[in-house]
Image (cartoon, grey):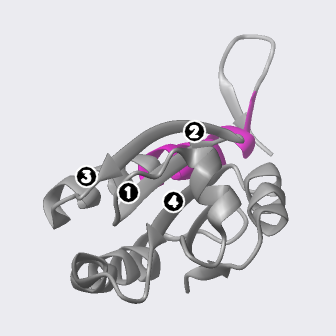
Amino acid sequence: MSIIDIKTKAQFDELVQKTPYVALQAHAVWCGPCKAISPFFGKFAAALGLAEKYTFARFDTDEVPDLAFELGVRSIPAFFFFENGAKTTDLTAPKPPALQKVVEDLSTKAKAGDAVSATTTDGDGNGAHL
């Protein structure tokens, strides 16, 4: 799955409203550390993204300053993670292993959400697949 480039705060708001799990990178084109970590974020997006369940996105803090302000970005790269529209975790100046752990944990939750939505409980408390 590819990374969505956020160009407006409204686009971001719509994304977190319609997608249960979102991993968001705040970056800038001139930022060396951003360029160093971005390939890892791209690799995680390709391996862990789930259509309509778990989306990876990024935005340039110079192009969408109102979103940077709302999220409280003080340094970049910064990563923010959302579950059902609410910010749950953030990482600033992360190392690849720390980023990997957070994106994998969110992927596990997204996959578990798929399993829960495909299962209902019958009267005996046993799971029954739809």
What secondary structure is the magenta-colored segment mainly? helix
The residue singled out by tag 4 in the image is 23
Which of disc 2 and disc 1 is earlier in sequence?
2
Q: What is the three-letter code of the residue carrying label 3?
A: Lys
Q: What is the three-letter code of the residue carrying label 4?
A: Ala
The residue singled out by tag 3 in the image is 101
The residue singled out by tag 1 in the image is 103
Number of other residues with Cα within 10 Å of mark 4, as a class: few under 14, some 14 to 19, many 20 or more: many
Q: What is the three-letter code of the residue carrying label 1?
A: Val
Along the viewing direction, whichever of 130 and 63 lies nearer the viewer: 63
Span shown in magenta: 107-120
Check if mark 2's residue and mark 3's residue have beta carbons within 8 Å: no
Q: Secondary structure at mark 3?
A: helix
Check if mark 1's residue and mark 3's residue have beta carbons within 8 Å: yes
The residue singled out by tag 2 in the image is 87
Q: Nearer the viewer, mark 2 or mark 3?
A: 2
Q: Secondary structure at mark 2?
A: strand
On the image, the x and y values in percent for residue 24 come to 52, 62
Q: Secondary structure at mark 1?
A: helix
Which of disc 3 and disc 2 is earlier in sequence?
2
Residue at mark 1 to residue at mark 3: CA–CA distance: 6 Å
User: Within the magenta stretch, is there residue 110?
Assistant: yes
Which of disc 3 and disc 4 is earlier in sequence?
4
94 displayed left or right of 75: left
Residue at mark 1 to residue at mark 4: CA–CA distance: 7 Å
Which of disc 4 and disc 2 is earlier in sequence?
4
